[in-house]
């Protein structure tokens, strides 16, 4: 039987491009943005970008001049295993995770350069401040009053399954080329999501292989594709990925580096929605239907609808966690949850 044909990325609509002439213009455009956009050349003047345009080896040398002497976590694929870091046929990971110094990791990349059978090498979401000295300040996007988490992603050619993140994300392509295939948040049911607690990198991923989608097994993926957008980034380009947008990511060159910034508009003292979902699966999902119906109505009352009728009959100073949360009331709610979960 013939292998399934891959997605025709050239036939998919492109992510819109924006021409932003200043940091203030970027700050203004990001405020309240809910759809993705590309900014060509946003970080073209970064020293890291210039080093990568010289060669992958020059980019690695530049990174080594800034790295800290500590162990980095790196995912190593299987020899002849291809570039997709995912599950194997038994739903174990098709890669291993090890700790090594950055010079050791880069020495392996150097030794395998040009070897088509070499295992994929991928350093994911490495904190720029914790693992490098001066790299963040020398290669920086001004994001106004936002206080983002800045991370770097380094590796050989890789394909990362479609997943989403809670924060907003500005992804800056520094070395090599990257292709993002994006799906709106509401397409989750058409992406055929895998396990929640057993994932390649902490987030639930689509089980569909975009290089060879099996439409017999995943027929609704055709609907997801009808909503898909593609962004192809060259060194220096940046892509804004709004909160909860699904994105499949391909690093296309022999050596690739991406720097990204994550931030959330909501207060940091608030909890993570994924934790609430996990707790709901633990506490609510397997109840009898009539009990689930009650809890669905109560969730709507307190969480999703959350109208004035929830608290209007309670004195203002007695509303506790029913009022908009503060650092103090959020801390008390978190402490109560921790006590309850530890029983």
Image: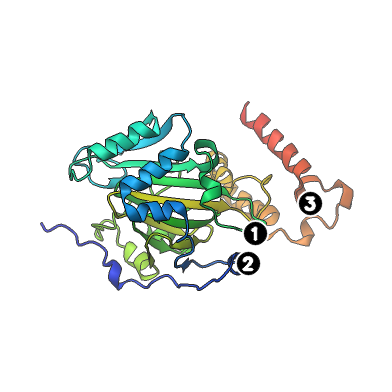
Choose between 65 and 112: the one closer to the eye.
65
Side of 317 relative to 206 (left or right): right
Tell me which residue sits at (39%, 59%) in the image. 235
Q: For residue 24, which numbered disc appears in the image?
A: 2
Task: State the image quarter where residue 208 is shown.
Answer: bottom left
Decide: marks 2, 1 in contact (CB < 8 A)?
A: yes
Q: Position of residue 79 (x, y in %)?
A: 20, 38
In this view, the mark in front (3 or 1): 1
Residue 92 vertical position relative to residue 181 in the rendered view, above or below: above
Residue denoted by label 3: 323
Residue 224 vertical position relative to residue 217 in the rendered view, above or below: below
Choose between 63 and 240: the one closer to the eye.
63
Choose between 265 and 87: the one closer to the eye.
265
Label 2, residues with CA under 10 Å away: few <14, some 14-19, many ≥20 = few
Looking at this view, name the residue that lies furthest to the left.
1
Residue denoted by label 1: 144
Label 3, residues with CA under 10 Å away: few <14, some 14-19, many ≥20 = few
Q: Position of residue 106 (x, y in %)?
A: 33, 37
Choose between 212 and 120: the one closer to the eye.
120
Earlier sequence position, callout 2 versus callout 1: 2
In this view, the mark in front (2 or 3): 2
Query: Rounded to the nearest whole Å, what is the CA distance between mark 2 and mark 3?
Result: 34 Å
Tell me which residue sits at (60%, 64%) in the image. 23
SS label for mark 1: loop
Query: Rounded to the nearest whole Å, what is the CA distance between mark 2 and mark 1?
Result: 7 Å
SS label for mark 3: loop
Tell me which residue sits at (68%, 60%) in the image. 305
Query: Rounded to the nearest whole Å, what is the CA distance between mark 3 and mark 1?
Result: 29 Å
Q: For residue 95, which numbered disc appears in the image?
A: none
Looking at this view, name the residue that lies furthest to the top.
343
Earlier sequence position, callout 3 versus callout 1: 1
């Amino acid at each position: 039987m013939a292998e399934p044909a891959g997605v025709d990325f050239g036939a998919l609509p492109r992510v819109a491009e924006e021409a932003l002439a200043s940091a203030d213009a970027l700050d203004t455009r990001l405020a309240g943005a809910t759809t993705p956009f590309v900014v060509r050349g946003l970080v073209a003047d970064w020293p890291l970008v210039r080093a990568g345009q010289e060669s992958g080896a020059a980019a690695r040398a530049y990174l080594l001049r800034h790295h800290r002497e500590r162990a980095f976590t790196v995912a190593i694929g299987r020899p002849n295993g291809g570039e997709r870091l995912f599950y194997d046929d038994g739903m174990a990971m098709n890669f291993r995770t090890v700790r090594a110094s950055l010079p050791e990791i880069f020495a392996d990349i150097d030794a395998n350069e040009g070897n088509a059978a070499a295992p994929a090498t991928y350093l994911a979401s490495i904190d720029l401040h914790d693992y490098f000295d001066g790299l963040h300040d020398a290669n920086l996007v001004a994001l106004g009053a936002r206080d983002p988490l800045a991370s770097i992603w380094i590796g050989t050619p890789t394909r990362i399954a479609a997943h989403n993140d809670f924060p907003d994300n500005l992804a800056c392509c520094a070395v090599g080329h990257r292709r993002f295939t994006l799906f709106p948040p509401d397409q989750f049911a058409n992406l055929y999501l895998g396990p929640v607690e057993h994932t390649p990198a902490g987030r639930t991923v689509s089980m569909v292989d975009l290089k060879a989608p099996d439409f017999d097994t995943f027929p609704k993926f055709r609907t997801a594709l009808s909503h898909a957008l593609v962004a192809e980034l060259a060194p220096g380009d940046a892509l804004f990925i709004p909160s909860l947008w699904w994105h499949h990511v391909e690093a296309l060159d022999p050596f690739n580096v991406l720097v990204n910034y994550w931030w959330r508009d909501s207060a940091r003292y608030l909890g993570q929605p994924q934790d609430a979902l996990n707790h709901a699966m633990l506490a609510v999902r397997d109840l009898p239907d009539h009990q689930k119906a009650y809890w669905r109505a109560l969730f709507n009352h307190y969480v999703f609808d959350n109208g004035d009728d929830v608290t209007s009959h309670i004195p203002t100073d007695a509303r506790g966690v029913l009022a908009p949360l503060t650092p103090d009331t959020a801390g008390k709610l978190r402490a109560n949850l921790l006590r309850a979960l530890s029983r």
